[in-house]
Image (cartoon, grey):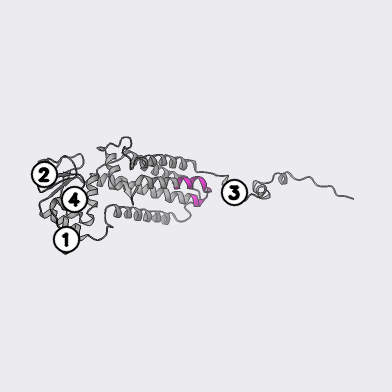
């Protein structure tokens, strides 16, 4: 006597997507990739950051300046300064890369503790770097940039959003240890940036540049400039560690909007940098070769 076949249960009839995918020869990882669960608030902020940094990066080497960034404005001073580049790449493009990495992490990684920790590290690092550049603009250049501040606010909001949307298991270690690790990485990163951009990691002093700087001082030459002036910063870069030996006169000791120094008024200085060598007035950045020629510098004896 033949047995009757039992009807398939409802549970068996509704095969799970993973089993269906497996029977169809599709890997479960492929199915998972199609089930993205992005962190929407973080992703939106990352897109805003991409737009800001991409806009600034687009104008980094162009003849035109970004909106509200005229040469006289604080934004223009910062965008034209030596702080606007790192290793020959515009700082805005470094920021663009960081925002892109955050967006990729927020949209493609599964919503687990590992994703939260990565977002916390990346957005926290970006927040620390934003604070560093904001303070650098205020302290070193006496200037602020609206676009840069907008990016800093975006990154800060992202970091706060990540912290507020943490999973119950976060941070996966004691909060004290997690915060200490973050602080150490922030300090090392911003410290390295400051050391590099302020010339503390420059190679040993070049003897010929040192001799030229001392010759300019001894010959009575004067170099008039301003601490916030982008071209003055480039002039200093040409002399490396010997820059402090130049016969420099600071024309804006009271800040970018303060009263001009009397010595600069008496010399009728109208642009920075301005060199006065052997009674001749020369404006703009001058190479060591040009300064040698104008000052009659014969070079280091024996070389």
* Alpha carbons under labels 3 and 4: distance apart: 64 Å
Q: Are marks 3 and 1 in contact (CB under 8 Å)?
A: no
**CA gap, disc 4 and disc 1:** 16 Å
- Where does label 2 land, which residue? 263
User: In this figure, which residue is indicated by the disc labeled 4?
Assistant: 290
Please say whether residue 209 is visible from this viewpoint.
yes
Q: Residues within 10 Å of mark 4 (few under 14, many from 20)?
A: few
x 29%, y 47%: residue: 83
Q: Between tags 4 and 2, which lies in front?
A: 4
Find the distance from the CA under tag 3 to the CA under tag 1.
68 Å
Which badge, 3 or 4, is on the more N-terminal residue? 3
Residue 231 is left or right of residue 222, and the answer is right
Magenta span: 101-115
Q: For the residue labelled by badge 4, is the local secondary structure a helix, a strand or a loop?
A: helix
Where the C terminus falls, by quadrant?
Answer: bottom left
Mark nearer the N terminus (3 vs 1): 3
Name the spot of residue 122 as percent of width and height, x first: 42, 49
Residue under numbered circle 1: 300
Q: CA distance from mark 3 to mark 2?
A: 72 Å
Rendered image quadrant of residue 268: top left
The numbered disc on residue 30 is 3
- Dominant SS of magenta comes to helix
Q: Position of residue 71 (x, y in %)?
A: 26, 38
Q: Marks 4 and 2, Cα distance to the nearest angstrom?
A: 25 Å
Label 3 or label 2, whichever comes before in sequence order: 3
Which element carries disc 2, helix, strand or loop? helix
Could you tell me how far apart the alpha carbons at marks 2 and 1 are, in whole angstroms?
31 Å
Q: Earlier in the sequence, mark 4 or mark 1?
A: 4
């Amino acid at each position: 006597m033949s047995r009757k076949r039992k009807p398939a249960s409802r549970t068996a009839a509704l095969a799970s997507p993973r089993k269906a995918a497996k029977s169809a020869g599709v890997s479960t990882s492929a199915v998972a990739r199609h089930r993205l669960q992005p962190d929407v608030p973080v992703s939106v902020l990352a897109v805003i950051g991409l737009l800001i940094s991409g806009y600034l990066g687009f104008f980094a080497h162009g003849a035109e300046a970004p909106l509200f960034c005229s040469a006289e404005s604080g934004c223009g001073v910062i965008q034209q300064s030596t702080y606007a580049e790192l290793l020959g790449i515009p700082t805005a493009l470094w920021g663009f890369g960081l925002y892109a990495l955050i967006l990729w992490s927020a949209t493609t990684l599964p919503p687990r503790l590992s994703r939260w920790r990565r977002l916390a590290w990346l957005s926290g690092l970006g927040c620390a770097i934003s604070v560093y550049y904001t303070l650098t603009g205020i302290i070193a250049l006496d200037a602020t940039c609206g676009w840069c501040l907008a990016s800093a606010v975006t990154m800060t909001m992202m970091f706060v959003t990540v912290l507020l949307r943490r999973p119950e298991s976060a941070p996966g270690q004691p909060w004290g240890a997690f915060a200490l690790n973050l602080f150490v990485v922030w300090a090392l990163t911003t410290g390295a940036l400051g050391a590099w951009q302020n010339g503390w990691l420059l190679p040993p002093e070049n003897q010929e540049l040192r001799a030229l700087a001392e010759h300019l001082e001894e010959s009575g030459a004067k170099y008039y400039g301003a601490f916030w002036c982008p071209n003055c910063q480039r002039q200093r870069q040409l002399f490396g560690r010997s820059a402090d030996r130049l016969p420099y006169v600071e024309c804006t000791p009271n800040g970018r909007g303060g009263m001009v120094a009397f010595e600069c008024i008496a010399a009728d200085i109208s642009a920075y940098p301005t060199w006065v060598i052997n009674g001749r007035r020369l404006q703009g950045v001058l190479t060591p070769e040009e300064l040698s020629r104008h000052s009659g510098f014969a070079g280091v004896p024996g070389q």
